[in-house]
Amino acid sequence: MTERVFVDTNVWVYAVDRAEPIKRERARAAIAPRADAHITVSSQVLSEFYTVVTRKLATPMSEEQAAQMVDRLSQLPVVPTDADLVLRRSRGAERGASPSAMPSSSVRPRSRAVLSS
């Protein structure tokens, strides 16, 4: 059975961050293609990824490189960020759950796993 796996921004950022080689290796392993998983991202992940890699890394990516990465990531299934999604995640956080550890049911389309660090 193939499961949907939602991959959060920080995993994508670590996958390209040369300043964090151990985290980079782990992130790349986590996002490596697998026959039993379909990786999913959100429109918010695309936006956050671009901002972080062009402004916050020790050695930022060029805007052109970052745009190419966002273009490649946008080929994956992209969950739109809407008020309903934000509300469901915030309600989970109110109950004491970390937003990065939220159950996959808070991410559409229904993901069976959420990868975040």
Image: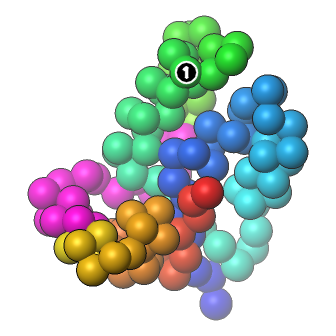
The residue sitting at the left extreme is: 83
**Mark 1 residue element:** loop
In this rendering, position of residue 3 left or right of residue 50: right
The residue sitting at the bottom extreme is: 1
Figure quadrant of residue 72? top right
The quadrant the C terminus occupies is bottom right
In this rendering, position of residue 104 left or right of residue 36: left
Determine crowd level at label 1: few under 14, some 14-19, many 20+ residues with C-alpha closer than 10 A.
few
- Identify the residue at image location x=76%, y=68%: 34
> Along the line of sight, which residue is nearer the eye, 94 or 43?
94
The quadrant the N terminus occupies is bottom right
- Identify the residue at image location x=62%, y=43%: 12
Query: Residue 116: x percent and y percent?
Result: 57, 59
- Give the answer, above or below, for where 27 lies relative to 92: above
- Identify the residue at image location x=78%, y=46%: 23
> Along the line of sight, which residue is nearer the eye, 28 or 18?
18
- Identify the residue at image location x=79%, y=35%: 20
- Give the answer, above or below, for where 86 lies relative to 59: below
Viewer can see residue 103:
yes
Residue 1 belongs to magenta span: no
Label count reads 1
The residue segment tinted magenta is: 73-90
Q: Which residue is mark 1?
A: 56
Under mark 1, the amino acid is: Lys
- Give the answer, above or below, for where 62 lies relative to 7: above
Q: Specify the color scheme.
A: rainbow
Query: Residue 52: x percent and y percent?
Result: 51, 27
Query: Residue 56: x percent and y percent?
Result: 55, 21
